[in-house]
Image: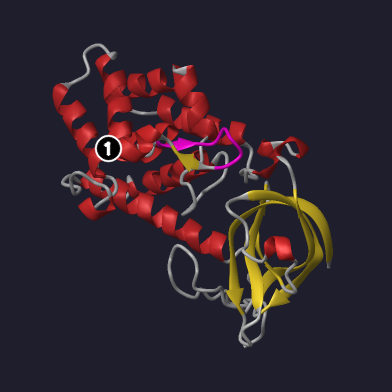
Amino acid sequence: MSLRSTFLATETVVRPDSRGSPYLSTKLVDKTGSVDARMWRLPAEFSNGLSGPEYVYVEGNAHEYRGMLQVKVERMRVLSKNEVEKEDYLPATENDRESLAEELIEAGRALEDPHLRELFARMVADEELWESFCAAPAAKAMHHARLGGLLEHSVCCLRVAQALAELYPVDKSLLIFGAVFHDVGKTKELSWENGSFAYTTEGRLQGHVILGDRIVASHVSQTPGFPEELALQLSHLMLSHQGEKEYGSPEQPKTLEALLVNLLDNLDARAAMFLESTRNVALGGWSHHENPLRRGLYVPDRTAGP
């Protein structure tokens, strides 16, 4: 399939092939996602790759290679910044963000605990926060790395939490609130305004766990009569949702609600890693090992006979 289009080229390196000849390996990104690309017979301007992410015009062919979609680049031209609209190259959710946001709002309205219900409403009413929450990626690269990715991740975690609340003796309101807002610190940890996803200085210095706890605590302080014990449990949930200290958690989960939020967060993140890493893998094929799960991933051909 012939290809003529513009992309953001990222992760570009020059490597030797099995015969020692150099080729360019890159990832081509646009709103729909990304695809691996290779260019042989390198012109002089690409003999050392690219110095960083660049907007490029590409001519080539898309084909299947070892079970994965790959682009063979025949010609490539680096574009100047004034030739592109940066937002056209940021991956974005294919889901309706308005519908996803409404699903979260309805869950907040249904919370049985009046204090958490009011806190939820206050956070949604914070226009700057809510706008960022609905636009932010859930990560720079690992999973849900797209506009609206945080919203997608939160909705999936909410749905899992609603099922878990029917199985275990939990404070359902606390579990639901934590499932929705555990990653709210991503709204300050990440930037998505300049044509790419990046960490903010605030994010690099403090991380989304601390930032999220502070965001929630700020709104708790503005909620009259919020119980001190509930505030403590909520803060613990926010601070422990990464699970282990080596993953950025100041504390390990020590309540049932905190433990379940950590597990559902990890469940959805890892499922997303699998789906995103195998998006261009043919049925019955394997992904390469260069993915967040650090292993080859197999996509069974369920249409094949016994």
Q: Tell me, yes or no, if residue 282 can be seen here.
A: no
Count of numbered circles on the image: 1
Question: What residue lies at 49% left-to-right and 18% top-to-bottom?
Answer: 127
Can you give x and y, in whole percent of width and height, for residue 289 in the image?
49, 73
In terms of image quadrants, where is residue 186?
A: top left
For the record, the magenta segment spans 189-196
Direction from residue 115 to residue 104 in the image, left or right: right
Q: Name the amino acid type tagged 1.
A: Met
Can you give x and y, in whole percent of width and height, for residue 149 in the image?
53, 43
Can you give x and y, in whole percent of width and height, for residue 41 in the image?
75, 74
In terms of image quadrants, where is residue 225?
A: top left
- Most foreground residue, 18 or 65: 18
Direction from residue 301 to residue 121 in the image, left or right: left
Question: What residue lies at 67% left-to-right and 44% top-to-bottom?
Answer: 89
Q: Main secondary structure of the magenta part?
A: loop
Question: What residue lies at 39% left-to-right and 56% top-to-bottom?
Answer: 267
- Most foreground residue, 213 or 159: 213
The residue identified by callout 1 is 238
- Most foreground residue, 234 or 297: 297
Question: What residue lies at 18% left-to-right and 45% top-to-bottom?
Answer: 251
Name the image quarter holding the N terminus: bottom right
Can you give x and y, in whole percent of width and height, for residue 209 in the image?
30, 39
Local secondary structure at mark 1: helix
When the figure is inspected, residue 20 is found, relative to residue 277, above or below; the finding is below
Would you call the spot at circle 1 few (<14 residues within 10 Å), some (14-19), or many (20 or more)? Answer: many
Q: Is residue 192 magenta?
A: yes
